Image (tube, rainbow, N blue to C red):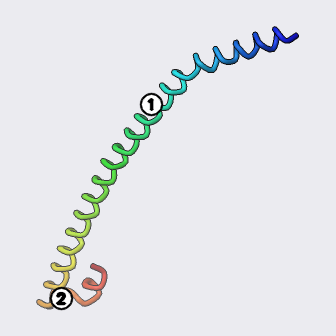
C-alpha cells in the first residue's frame, strides 16, 4: 500500500513538473494578448479624440456663422441658439 502512495506521489510530481512550462506559456500568451488589446483600445481612443476635436471645430464654426448672420439681420436669434 505504501508503494502505491509513493508511485502516486511520483506520478503527481512528474505531472506538475510537465505542466509548469505549459502554464508559463499560457501566462506569456495571455500577457501578449492583454498588451495587444490595450494597444488596440489606445488606437481607438485616439480616433475618438480626433473625431471629437473635429466635431468641436465644426460646431464652433457653425456658431460663428450663425452669429454673423444674426448680427447682419439675415437670421433671428433662434438660429444662434440652435447653433
Task: Name the N-terminal-most of marks 1 and 2.
Answer: 1
On screen, 4 above or below 43?
A: above
Q: Dividing the picture into quarters, in which one does residue 12 lie?
A: top right
Residue pictured at 49% horizontal, 32% vertical: 27
Read off the residue under disc 2.
70
On screen, 1 above or below 32?
A: above
- Sort mark 1 into few (<14), some (14-19) or many (20+) by Cα contacts within 10 Å: few
The quadrant of the rendering that contains the N terminus is top right
Alpha carbon separation for disc pair 1 and 2: 63 Å
Image coords of residue 75 (percent x, y): 20, 86
On screen, 24 above or below 15?
A: below
Looking at the rendered image, the disc whose residue lies closer to the viewer, 1 or 2, is 1
Residue pictured at 45% horizontal, 30% vertical: 29
Q: Dividing the picture into quarters, in which one does residue 53 lie?
A: bottom left
Residue pictured at 24% horizontal, 69% vertical: 56
Q: Is residue 57 left or right of residue 72?
A: right
Read off the residue under disc 1.
28
Amino acid at each position: 500500500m505504501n508503494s502505491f502512495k509513493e508511485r502516486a506521489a511520483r506520478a503527481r510530481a512528474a505531472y506538475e513538473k510537465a505542466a509548469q512550462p505549459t502554464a508559463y506559456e499560457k501566462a506569456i500568451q495571455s500577457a501578449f494578448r492583454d498588451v495587444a488589446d490595450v494597444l488596440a483600445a489606445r488606437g481607438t481612443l485616439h480616433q475618438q479624440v480626433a473625431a471629437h476635436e473635429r466635431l468641436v471645430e465644426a460646431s464652433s464654426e457653425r456658431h460663428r456663422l450663425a452669429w454673423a448672420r444674426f448680427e447682419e439681420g439675415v437670421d433671428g436669434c433662434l438660429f444662434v441658439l440652435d447653433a
